[in-house]
């Protein structure tokens, strides 16, 4: 672990920084997959809400 010896004998420790990299933008196929998954998630949540409403208004 890297450290610096300061005045008075104090040690100052530094964290090891991770290697940096640039994120790549999503491809057209990944964007399409995100849109499909988002639509399926919206349908799933809508279905759960519909079931909850149907159960709460029953009888």
Image (cartoon, grey):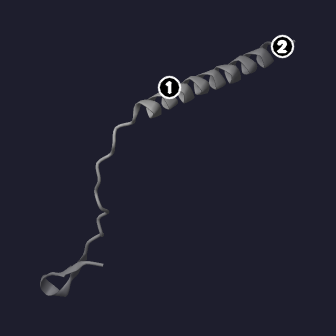
Is 42 left, or right, of 16 in this rendering?
right
Along the viewing direction, whichever of 8 and 15 lies nearer the viewer: 15
Is 8 left, or right, of 50 in this rendering?
left
Q: From what the image shows, is residue 31 above or below residue 18? A: above
Disc 1 to disc 2, how far (Cα)? 35 Å
Residue highlighted by disc 2: 58
Disc number for residue 19: none
From the top left corner, tell me how far across and down residue 36 is, in percent: 55, 26
**Residue shown at 25%/78% (left/top)?**
2
Which sits earlier in the primary sequence, circle 1 or circle 2? 1
Q: From what the image shows, is residue 14 above or below residue 53? A: below
Is 39 left, or right, of 4 in this rendering?
right
Quadrant placement of the C terminus: top right
Q: Secondary structure at mark 1?
A: helix
**Residue shown at 28%/56% (left/top)?**
20
Quadrant placement of the N terminus: bottom left
Residue highlighted by disc 1: 35
């Amino acid at each position: 672990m890297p450290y610096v010896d300061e005045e008075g004998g104090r040690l100052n420790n530094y964290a090891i920084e991770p290697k940096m990299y640039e994120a790549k933008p999503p491809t057209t196929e990944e964007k399409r997959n995100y849109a499909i998954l988002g639509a399926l998630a919206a349908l799933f949540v809508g279905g759960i809400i519909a079931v909850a409403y149907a159960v709460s208004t029953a009888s």
